[in-house]
Amino acid sequence: MSSYNPFSLSGKTILVTGASSGIGRTTAIECSKMGGRVVITGRDSNRLQETYQELVGVDHVQVVADLTDSKDVDSLVDSCGILDGLVLCAGIGKISPFQFCTQDKMNDVFAINYFSPVELLRRLVKKKVIAKCGSVVFVASIGGCPGGKFTYGNGIYGASKAALWSMMRFAAKELAIRKIRVNGVNPGMVETNLIKHGIITDEQHKADMETYPLKRYGQPEDIAHGIVYLLSDAASWVTGHSLVIDGGCTI
């Protein structure tokens, strides 16, 4: 039987940020299952170790780092070696009606959701750590892309992801000369701790789920598999693209 698999990550080293929980954790695990050597990073050492223990294969690396701390970013960049893939998944949410969207709240969200991933990518590119034909994937949101879903109180989060979506396209344009592909995924609502810790009530949860044609929220694996595709050679002619994975809710 042929072992041909264009979606394989065998022989590739992939850095995944936000790997201590949620989509980031699942993405790191799925990348390892697809044969990739994974470098994982997050702020919580205990949770990052839990992810590390679930990785399949050997030679993986974990680096505890706060991506808003310049020294931590330097250490992370120095620890990576040459990367074939980068998944920028670290992020936070904040629900706030527009009249309460103070600059302090915006600074908190943009620091993690926008400035940190963009600065990390900039430093990796400047140090030429990303290999030729490498792949970068920004994890954005349907709340921050054209034709997306714009919900009450989600303006700060959505704006940070919209900025990320825009920078993804500019980066794709500029890094193409190095044969580096830059894409994004725009998930709909995904069953992670972000929605399980009181951001919305159970009643709101069920009502919103009914607005999705497939009548369910996504699982982290649904997003991770899309990311694996963009990292793989199967997507070698895809750059500057946002892959919407949302159960049809933006139809």
Image (cartoon, helix red, strand yellow):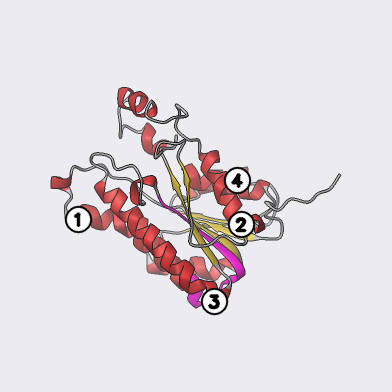
CA distance separating discs 4 and 3: 31 Å
Which comes before the other along the chain, label 3 or label 2? 3
The answer to whether the residues at label 4 and label 3 have Cβ atoms under 8 Å apart is: no
**Residue 135 within the segment the image draws in magenta:** yes
The answer to whether the residues at label 4 and label 1 have Cβ atoms under 8 Å apart is: no
Q: Residues within 10 Å of mark 1 (few under 14, many from 20)?
A: few
Say which quadrant the C terminus sits in.
Answer: top left
SS assignment at label 3: helix
SS assignment at label 1: helix
CA distance separating discs 4 and 1: 35 Å
Magenta stretch? Answer: 124-140
Q: Amino acid at mark 1?
A: Asp
Q: Which residue is mark 1?
A: 104
The structure residue drawn at horizontal position 41% and vertical position 51%, both measured from the top left corner, is 140
**Looking at the image, residue 126 lies above or below residue 34:** below
Q: Residues within 10 Å of mark 2 (few under 14, many from 20)?
A: some
The structure residue drawn at horizontal position 38% and vertical position 59%, both measured from the top left corner, is 164
Q: Amino acid at mark 3?
A: Ile
CA distance separating discs 2 and 1: 39 Å
Which comes before the other along the chain, label 4 or label 3? 4
CA distance separating discs 2 and 4: 20 Å
Q: Which of labels 1 and 3 is toward the front?
A: 3
The structure residue drawn at horizontal position 34% and vertical position 55%, both measured from the top left corner, is 162
**Residue 195 within the segment the image draws in magenta:** no
Which image quadrant is residue 203 in?
Answer: top left
Q: Which residue is mark 2?
A: 235
